[in-house]
Image (cartoon, helix red, strand yellow):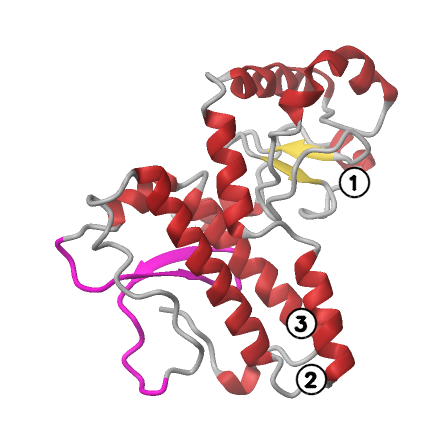
Amino acid sequence: MEVGSISSAPRTVEEIFKDYSSRRAGIVRALTHDVDEFYAQCDPEKENLCLYGHPNDSWEVNLPAEEVPPELPEPALGINFARDGMNRRDWLSLIAVHSDSWLLSVAFYLGARLNRNERKRLFSMINELPTVFEVVSDRRRSKEKSGVDSASKSKLSTKRSSEGQIKSNSKTADEEYGEDDDEHSETLCGTCGGSYSADEFWIACDVCERWFHGKCVKITPAKAESIKQYKCPGCSSKKGRQ
């Protein structure tokens, strides 16, 4: 389990927010895109398990840290025990709420030396992002719309493949897909979990087919024009480990 050394822990507001965002992105992925894999790993027959989000945007289901006290606050213990005793959607929502609590506890543990104004700024930055619970709930409602959103994404993905372009802030996107605005609003960024907005630049991964804010994966519209096949950071790192 990769908790990192406390001596090298983030210190500034920006560093702590980056740590928070990365851990959050990993947890969001576990509870949405990787939900089947996450569900399988939470075997009720195993010992007390926790869901960890790591600073490299990854997630992990593992036993709690053995150190007492641990180097960082620990997430909810025993998430696997209730898996088969609850409605799956309620179980995921419960884990999302506990994960939000854990993410905040880690952020403010790392920010223990911040002054009042810095703590206020950190919370304001965190509060700009939807909570894990909000993201999981939005994704759940999206899946319950009989796959309408999936069809919409498929059309947009085809458009990107043929033109080397993706969802953008151009009028063309609004005019061509204006009737699907409500459906697009259910599309979530694979990094920050934010909802789709027509005035922002988005790009889709050609491997996992998830959508991302261009700013979250550091891709500009100009750069996207020269990319024949885009792989998100998660898929790129997976290939490197194989």
Return the residue nearer the eye: 133 or 156: 133
Looking at the figure, which quarter contains the N terminus?
Answer: bottom left
Tell me the number on the disc at residue 94.
Answer: none
Q: Position of residue 17 (x, y in %)?
A: 65, 66
* Magenta span of residues: 45-69
Q: Are marks 3 and 1 in contact (CB under 8 Å)?
A: no
Residue type beneath disc 2: Leu
* Real-space Cα separation, disc 1 to disc 2, in angstroms: 34 Å
Residue depicted at 56% across the width and 21% down the height: 149
Which quarter of the picture shows residue 21? bottom right
Query: Do the CB atoms of the residues marked 3 and 2 lie less than 8 Å apart?
Result: no
Q: Earlier in the sequence, mark 3 or mark 1?
A: 3
Name the residue carrying label 3.
15
Near-viewer residue (202 or 113):
113
Q: Which mark is residue 114?
A: 2
Question: Is residue 235 depicted above or below 187 in this figure?
Answer: below
Residue type at numbered disc 3 = Glu
Circle 2 packing at 10 Å, graded few (<14), some (14-19), many (20+), is: some
- Say which quarter of the image contains residue 40: top left
Of callouts 1 and 2, the N-terminal one? 2
What percent of the width, then of the height, locates residue 132? 52, 51
Vertical arrangement, residue 89 with respect to residue 79, above or below: above
- Residue 80 in the image: x percent, y percent? 24, 54
Q: Alpha-carbon distance for marks 3 and 1?
A: 23 Å
Which element carries disc 3, helix, strand or loop? helix
Q: Residue drawn at (51%, 35%), measured in percent from left and top?
A: 139
Residue, disc 1: 220
Query: Horizontal placement of 99 versus 180: left or right?
Result: left
Q: Is residue 61 left or right of residue 206?
A: left
Q: Quadrant of residue 68?
A: bottom left
Q: Is residue 57 part of the magenta span, yes or no?
A: yes
Residue 115 on image: x %, y %: 73, 86
